[in-house]
Image (cartoon, rainbow, N blue to C red):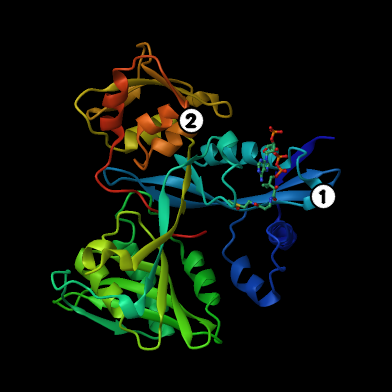
Amino acid sequence: MGVDVRALDPAEYRAAQDVFMAALMRPPTTDEQWRVREGTIRQGDVLGGFHDGTLAGTTRLFGSTLRVPGGAAVPAGAVTAVGVRADKTRRGVLTALMRAQLTDAKNRGHVVAMLHASEAAIYGRFGYGAATRARQVRLTIASVKWRDDMPRGGAVRLVDRADAEKLLPELYRRIGTARPGMMERSDGWWRVGFSRHEQRSLYGYAVHSDEHGDDDGYALYHAVPLGGDDIKLQVHDLVAATSTAAAELWRFLTGIDLATEIEAARPVDEPLEWWLQDARQCRTVDVFDDLWVRLVDVPAALHARTFGGSTPVVIEVRDRILPQNDGVYRIGSDGAERSERSPQLVMDVESLGALYLGDVSVSTVAAANRVEVRDPAALEDADAVFTTPRQPWCGTHF
Ligand SMILES: CC(=O)SCCNC(=O)CCNC(=O)[C@H](O)C(C)(C)COP(=O)(O)OP(=O)(O)OC[C@H]1O[C@@H](n2cnc3c(N)ncnc32)[C@H](O)[C@@H]1OP(=O)(O)O
């Protein structure tokens, strides 16, 4: 029996949400949570996969943009709420949904699709590559001593939730998407986020302003009792326009009385260790794949980002789902375009997605046999072409 996929009607969204929550083994969305979420879903965004006439699986795609190396922001489809009923898995429901969604993303003009994966084994077959990483850092507050030469300046103040709901989205819009891998957040994203801040626990909203009094960073955190007298500050969001703002926000967080430790998922190249007198007091407890990127329109995606190196490379790209992307591309610091030349390297669109934001080198992917090297001399050139000065990072959960 095949799988039928169609865009769901708004009246079916709640049922789709239930399928998703059950697939994630989470309790169903409450009526109160649903009232907030419902209004953020646009018609046409939710797909349903039907097996034997039953809604067996679902996925949603909403419009955003993704910052790419060089500074452009490309139209991006953010994929979320993927789930298949446990009694309907491994029958091709997700496959049918992903194919339909990628075609839809292409028709909507999205240059890339992107997601956070619950498991790393799921999305590669659909052309998604792990394009950014994050590291989970933990600091024990009693042992944190900042260096005297750490960047300092400006002031940090706490704001209440009502002010945070106005200030943070505005600040994020202004400063929050500077790094490759960062994405635009919709009003709905913020509404759902703030609605999760329960009254029962402390949520803190700290804003940094520079020496002229202009706001240039914020931290959003949550106090988690650990048992006994121990309290962890879980930092959900820390966005700063300058290293001074970031450093001052970290200094503020580690100065909060009664907190015993801090944990946050951060960019892998944030210079926390460099600010500390004892670098080992910042512990990396995990490094994990963050944003997965799928190039939906390969020529447009390559055109949008800048490349480095002194010698261009010629790469053949293969795409089993969107064959319009198949072809040979010459990529270098002067741009990227289709080419008639014979390829030096051959890769599928998943590997290209992983390389797209500069998180991993071409040599590393080639060493895993995920790039076919036809001209070994091209590998070093390709590393230089794809390399970026800053590690990409998304920092937005969706
Ligand atoms: C962006 C997000 O929302 S992330 C959240 C994703 N959702 C979850 O993790 C919820 C729990 N899991 C599920 O709902 C389902 O198992 C899904 C969505 C992961 C997979 O759905 P299915 O309908 O079973 O996938 P489908 O039958 O199309 O499988 C396609 C292929 O992927 C493989 N596959 C599917 N899920 C997994 C997995 N979790 N691990 C490894 N392989 C997998 C299948 O074996 C199959 O391989 P094949 O083509 O070689 O036979």
Expressed as whole percent of the image width and height from the top left, the position of residue 381 reads 26, 25
The amino acid sitting under disc 1 is Asp
Q: Secondary structure at mark 1?
A: helix
Which image quarter is the N terminus in? top right
Q: Is residue 35 visible?
A: yes
Examine the rendered structure and indicate whether residue 187 appears above or below residue 194.
above
Dot 1 corresponds to which residue? 87
Q: Which quarter of the figure has residue 287?
A: bottom left
Which class describes the residues within 10 Å of circle 1: few (<14), some (14-19), or many (20+)? Answer: few
Q: Secondary structure at mark 2?
A: helix
* Residue at 40% over, 88% down: 258
Q: Earlier in the sequence, mark 2 or mark 1?
A: 1
Q: Gap in Å between the C-alphas at discs 2 and 1?
A: 31 Å
Expressed as whole percent of the image width and height from the top left, the position of residue 338 reads 36, 20
Expressed as whole percent of the image width and height from the top left, the position of residue 96 reads 69, 38
Examine the rendered structure and indicate whether residue 107 appears above or below residue 55.
above
Q: Nearer the viewer, residue 96 or 24?
A: 24
Q: Is residue 111 left or right of residue 380?
A: right
The amino acid sitting under disc 2 is Val
* Residue at 55% over, 29% down: 322
Examine the rendered structure and indicate whether residue 165 appears above or below residue 338.
below
